């Protein structure tokens, strides 16, 4: 906290339920201990919300069964064509806000012709359709942009993707070749 020079932190997450070099390994027991620390950060009021990231159903269910304070948010990779439905449902059924990181597939989605065609129906761009799609799915999108023009464009979301176009987007596969999915 001293090094961040902040009075409090808005949200603090466990980045992943396993060490990154052991992707997918079973660390359920260790996560219970880590979570006790997260709970103490929250009760100290130095952190306003605590949550998890990249937790699959196995790891989520174990944590929810043992937590005194449930995580408030799950952050996972989510974009048109890669939606982690089981992990999202598990979190939403347990009352968590689900945040979609990389909703533009780190940029790899931007050249997708099928999404471009849908964007044309609303006179907007692929990025806006990708972000709007996430919102209409009931998730909070977490796009990142360094260009001021992109930052502004990503707030221009006052249109609604109709049911037919949502179905088209739901059926798209392999929308972002090159993106390194967290497949676990
Ligand atoms: N929890 C986790 O494990 C995890 C993992 C990965 C990422 N994240 C977080 O998720 C957030 C977003 O992730 P991300 O950077 O991978 O992906 P992203 O938001 O899907 O894509 C970012 C890329 O899209 C471009 N972009 C943004 N808006 C655009 C627009 N309107 N038109 C055209 N291009 C646009 C950006 O370009 P410019 O920069 O040039 O604007 C950048 O190259 C980050 O805050 C990151 O920390 C979390």
Image (spheres, rainbow, N blue to C red):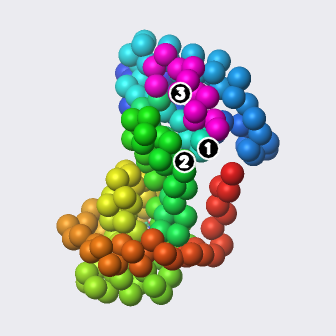
Camera-nearest residue between 17 and 163: 163
Q: Position of residue 142 (x, y in %)?
A: 42, 53
Q: Which residue is mark 3?
A: 64
Q: Earlier in the sequence, mark 1 or mark 2?
A: 1
- Label 1–label 2 contact, CB within 8 A: yes
Q: Earlier in the sequence, mark 3 or mark 1?
A: 1
Is residue 74 rendered magenta in the image?
Answer: no
* Residue drawn at point x = 74 percent, y = 44 percent: 24
Camera-nearest residue between 163 and 130: 163
- Label 3–label 1 contact, CB within 8 A: no
Seen in the picture, residue 78 relative to 53 is either above or below; the reply is below
What's the magenta region? 58-70
Q: Which residue is mark 2?
A: 87
Mark 1 vs mark 2, CA separation in Å: 5 Å
- Residue 14 shows up from this direction: no
Considering the numbered disc 3 on the image, is that residue within a helix, a strand or a loop? helix
Q: Does the numbered disc 3 mark a residue whose Cβ is under 8 Å from ligand 1? A: no
Mark 2 crowd level (few <14, some 14–19, many ≥20, 10 Å Cα): some
Considering the numbered disc 2 on the image, is that residue within a helix, a strand or a loop? helix
- Residue 112 shows up from this direction: yes
């Amino acid at each position: 906290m001293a090094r961040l020079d902040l009075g409090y932190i808005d949200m603090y997450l466990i980045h992943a339920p396993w060490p990154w070099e052991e992707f997918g390994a079973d660390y359920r027991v260790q996560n219970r201990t880590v979570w006790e620390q997260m709970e103490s950060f929250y009760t100290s009021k130095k952190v306003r919300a605590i949550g998890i990231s990249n937790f699959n159903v196995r790891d989520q269910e174990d944590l929810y069964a043992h937590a005194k304070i449930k995580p408030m948010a799950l952050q996972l990779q989510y974009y048109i064509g890669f939606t982690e439905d089981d992990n999202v449902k598990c979190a939403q059924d347990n009352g968590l806000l689900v945040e979609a990181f990389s909703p533009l597939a780190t940029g790899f989605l931007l050249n997708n012709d099928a999404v471009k065609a849908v964007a044309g129906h609303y006179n907007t761009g692929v990025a806006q359709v990708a972000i709007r799609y996430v919102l209409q799915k009931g998730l909070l999108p977490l796009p990142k942009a360094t260009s001021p023009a992109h930052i502004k464009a990503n707030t221009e979301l006052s249109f609604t993707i109709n049911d037919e176009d949502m179905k088209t987007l739901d059926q798209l596969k392999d929308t972002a070749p090159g993106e390194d999915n967290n497949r676990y």
